[in-house]
């Protein structure tokens, strides 16, 4: 399976990504997690990415695209993967299309988690307390939401047009949401 999980910041993508990946025995590839790991190890990529992340801005496409290309070339991703946090721009969609086409496979589904705006801000502020992520301050959260609406939300229409969109209500218990996602994905024939 080659899957994408999308949704506004705080919609619960990372949480659900782990369950979906386990269910289909594929790696969950989170660009945010990879960037954060690079920041904490002080790599050149981390140093480059950090200035954007701390401000809630997107890391430039060339940097992100190269990182994803390298990651999905790894052996564990040969039989499939779930992308969390990528693509986020139309340019990244085009790039990903090329990467998947090159392998002779196709994108099976794009899961979009929908969530209520007020609930999302609450979740993010709670996460800020628990995990202390540098980009979970109110001002930066607002910027990330703005960028999502401007640059990432339009991707939903693109994937809807291709008939691969699976919209799932992201409100409720974690288990309940996982159940909804599995119910929607289990009927999709594997490529
Ligand atoms: P969120 O929880 O807000 O969805 P992530 O953990 O997925 O955030 O990503 C954190 C930050 O990493 C983003 O705000 C952005 O700076 C950077 N980032 C992650 N994925 C991408 C991407 N596909 N393109 C550009 N920047 C990205």
Image (cartoon, helix red, strand yellow):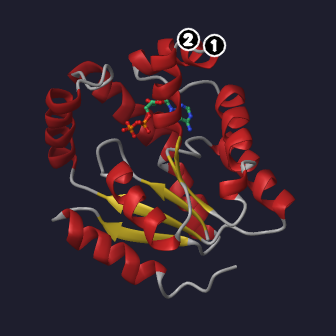
Instruction: Please provide percent x and percent y for residue 151.
Output: 52, 39
Mark 2 surroundings within 10 Å by alpha-carbon count, few (fewer than 14), some (14 through 19), many (20 or more): some
Q: Quadrant of the N terminus?
A: bottom right
Displayed quadrant of residue 118: top left
Q: Secondary structure at mark 2?
A: helix
Label 2 – label 1 distance at C-alpha: 5 Å
Query: Which residue position is annotated with label 1?
Result: 44
- The residue under the point 18% across, 42% down is 123
The answer to whether the residues at label 2 and label 1 have Cβ atoms under 8 Å apart is: yes
Q: Which residue is at a point 31% across and 70% down the rendered structure image?
A: 178
Q: Return the x and y of residue 130 as percentages of the image width and height.
A: 16, 32
Residue 110 drawn at (x, y percent): 53, 64
Is residue 163 shown left or right of residue 84? Answer: right
89 sits to left or right of 152:
right
Label drawn at residue 92: none
Quadrant in the picture for residue 17: bottom left
Q: Which residue is mark 2?
A: 47
Q: Nearer the viewer, residue 97 or 14?
A: 14
């Amino acid at each position: 399976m080659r899957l994408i999980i999308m949704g506004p910041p705080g919609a619960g993508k990372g949480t659900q990504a782990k369950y979906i990946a386990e269910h289909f025995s594929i790696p969950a590839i989170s660009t945010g997690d990879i960037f954060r790991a690079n920041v904490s190890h002080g790599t050149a990529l981390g140093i480059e990415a950090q200035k954007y992340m701390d401000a809630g801005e997107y890391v430039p496409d060339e940097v992100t695209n190269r990182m994803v290309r390298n990651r999905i070339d790894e052996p564990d991703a040969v039989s499939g993967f779930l992308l969390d946090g990528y693509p986020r721009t139309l340019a990244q969609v085009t790039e990903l299309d090329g990467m998947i086409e090159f392998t002779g496979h196709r994108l099976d589904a794009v899961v979009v988690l929908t969530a209520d705006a007020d609930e999302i801000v609450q979740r993010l502020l709670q996460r800020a307390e628990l995990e202390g992520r540098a980009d979970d301050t109110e001002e930066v959260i607002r910027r990330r939401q703005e960028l999502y609406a401007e640059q990432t939300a339009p991707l939903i229409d693109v994937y809807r047009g291709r008939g691969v969109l699976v919209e799932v209500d992201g409100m409720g218990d974690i288990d309940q949401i996982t159940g909804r996602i599995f119910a929607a994905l289990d009927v999709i024939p594997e490529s």
